[in-house]
Image: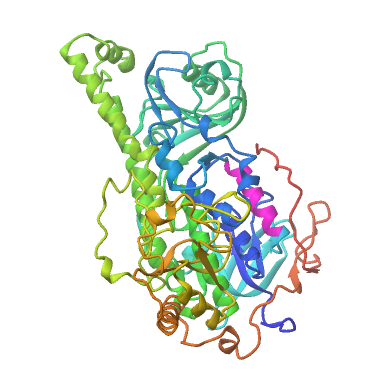
Amino acid sequence: MNDHDSTYDTDVIIVGLGPAGGTAALALATYGVRVHAVSMFPWVANSPRAHITNQRALEVLRDLGVEDEARTYATPWDQMGDTLFTTSLAGEEIVRMQTWGTGARYGDYLAGSPCAMLDIPQPLMEPVLIKNAAERGALISFNTEYLDHSQDEDGVTVRFRDVRSGTEFTQRARFLLGFDGARSKIAEQIGLPFEGELARAGTAYILFNADLSKYVAHRPSILHWIFNSKAGFGEIGMGLLRAIRPWGQWIAGWGFDMSQGEPDISDDVVLEQIRTLVGDPELTIDIMSRSFWYVNQQWAEHYQSGRVFCGGDAVHRHPPSSGLGSNTSMQDAFNLAWKIAYAVKGYAGPGLLESYSPERVPVGRQIVARANQSRKDYAGLREWFDPTSDDPVTAGLITLKAPSPEGAALRERLYEALEVKNTEFNAHGVELNQRYASSAVVPDLEAGEEVWGRDRELYLQATTRPGAKLPHAWLVGPDGTRVSTLDVTGKGQMTLLTGIGGQAWKRAAATLDLPFLRTIVIGEAGINDSYGYWRQIREIHEAGALLVRPDGYVAWRYSAPVWDDSEALTHLENALTIVLDRAPHETPSARNGGTPQYSTHAVPIVVPHVTADDATPASTASITPIEGAHACPARTPASGTI
C-alpha cells in the first residue's frame, strides 16, 4: 500500500493487549508496520496474574530493546527461588528447593542465555510493551470491544464498539491477530479446533498487603508452599503464598471443591486462612481483592484461518504451574510478528505465514501438558500426611521425623518427590529447547535425527541445527564490551552468519542486496570470538554459514566450507527461496507490482474519540478521525488494580 492508497485503515489489527498482544504490537511497530491494537478494558490487567519471566521471554524483550526497562519493575533473579515447603511461614520448615535456576543449575542458566530470569507481574509488564509500541507508531485503543469480522482474499474488515459511548465502527486491515484471551471470540468465530477440557479444578486467590519481611527476607522466594490441613484440598493439596511486591504484597491461594460451589471468602474467613498460612494469629492485613480461577487443560490444534491468526491464551489454556503462560504467549507473538511484517512488506510469499501453526501448535500442546502435570506432581510431596487423622499434617509430621525405618522411608520418598519438582521449577529445557519443523525451516539432512544427551525437559541442548534457537555465546564488540550472538542477529532482519573464512557467503549476500538480509562475519568488523565460545558451539566450519531468522531461530545451515562465490550464491538463494516462499531472484518491488505495499506514514484512521466524561448515547455520538494518534492513557492503574 502506498502513502496515498486508502484501501486499508491499517496493516494489522490486534485484539487484546495482554503479553501476547502487547508483544505483537511492539514488534510490528518496531518493524515499521502500521498496527492498531485494541482492548475492551480501560487499562492493563487488574490483577498480578502471570509473573515468572523466563530467559526466552527476556530474549524477546532484549531484541525489541525493552529488556532494561522491564527489569526496573521486576523482582530480581536472586530473590526468586529459595522456595519453602513449610507448615506456615512462622512454623516448621519441611524441605526447601532452589528454583528458577538459582541453585545448582545456576551455571546452566548463565551459559544458556545473556538474560537473567525475572519476576514481573503482568500489570507491570503490559505497560512496558504498550508504551513502547505507542512510542514507535502503534495506535493503541482501550475501551474498544471487538465484535466480529469478515475476511476476503485481500483483507479483513473488523467491527468494533466503543464501550463508553456504544458507538460501532469498522476498520479494514490486511491481517487480524486475535490475542483476546481464554474466552477468545476470534478463535471461536474462525472455528479453531480445540482438544482437552476447561475448568477441571478451582482455586481461590486473595490479593493482600502485609509486611512479611521477618519471615522471608532471609530466605527470599516468590513462592512459598504451605502444608496445612485447612488448605489441603485438590491436586496440589497445599496453600500458597506468592510474593507480588517483596515483601509487602502477596497472593494467598488454596484449592476448593467445585462440586460444593464457590467457597466463602468473606473477610473473617480470609483473615483466618491467611493468618493460618503465615502462622501469625495477630497478623494485620489489608485485603485488596479476591477472586476464583479455574484449571484449564485445553489447546488448539491450529492457530489460523486465512488472514486471521490467534495466539496466547486464546489457543493454549492452562494453570500457572511451571510459569509458562505469558512466556509462551509472548513467543507466539514474536514468531508471528516478523512473518506478518515480511508478508506486508512483500519480502515473503503466503507460504511463510502458513508456518505459524506448525511451529507453535506443538509448543502450545507441550506447555498445557507440562503445566497440568506439574500440579499432579505435588502428590509425592504429601505422601507423609496421615489420612486417618483429623489433622493429617500434624500427625504425619510425627512419623516423618521419627527415627524409625518408616520415618527413614518417608524422608527418602519426600526427597525423591522434591527432585521430581525440578520439572516444574528448573525446567530449562522446557523453556529453551523448542524445535520448529515447518516450511520456514530447511532441515539439515546430513545431521540425522537429534540425539538428546540429557533430559530434554530439564536441560538446554544448545545447537545450530535448523529449527533450534540460535545458541547464545559471548563475543567481544568493537569497544571491548561483551555482546551475545543474539545481539548481532534478529532486530527484524534475516542474518547470514559466517566466519572470516566465509568471504564467499559475504559476497553472495552483497550480490543479492536484499533489504531484509544482513551479513555478520564473526572475526571481523569488531565482532570477535575472543573467548572461543562460538567456535565450541557453532557445529559448522568457519567457512560454512547459518541463516538466522528475525525471531532468533536457525532457518538453514551449510556446515561444510564454501570458497566459491557462485556456489555460495546458489545455496543462499535456494535457502531464502524455501524459507520465505520467494521466487528466485525476486525483489520486494517485483512482488508488489513496483510500488511499496505498506506504509508507516500517518493516515486518518476512524476511531471514536470520546472520554468517560463526555460519552454520549450511540445514536448521537460523533466519530473523529485521529491523524496518527496514539490513544494511550496515562500510566495510572484503573480502580481495583495494583
Q: How is the image coloured?
A: rainbow
Our reading of the magenta stretch's main secondary structure is helix
Viewer-proximal residue, 164 or 624?
624
Q: Position of residue 554 (x, y in %)?
A: 42, 64
Viewer-proximal residue, 548 or 608?
548
| Magenta residue check for 124 | yes
Q: Position of residue 250 (x, y in %)?
A: 56, 28
Q: Residue at x 58, y 63 (%)?
A: 525
Image vertical order of residue 49 relative to residue 581, above or below = above
Q: Residue at x 37, y 65 (%)?
A: 541
Q: Position of residue 521 (x, y in %)?
A: 51, 66
Q: Quadrant of the C terminus?
A: top right
Q: Is residue 304 left or right of residue 631?
A: left
Query: For the magenta stretch, what is the residue range?
Result: 121-134
Total numbered labels: 0
Q: Is residue 342 visible?
A: yes
Q: Quadrant of the N terminus?
A: bottom right
Q: Is residue 565 left or right of residue 401?
A: right
| Magenta residue check for 424 | no
Q: Is residue 192 left or right of residue 218?
A: left
Image vertical order of residue 186 relative to residue 422, above or below = below
Q: Is residue 466 left or right of residue 119?
A: left
Q: Position of residue 68 (x, y in %)?
A: 63, 46
Splitting the image into 4 quarters, where does residue 156 fall?
Answer: bottom right
Viewer-proximal residue, 111 or 407?
111
Q: Is residue 182 visible?
A: no
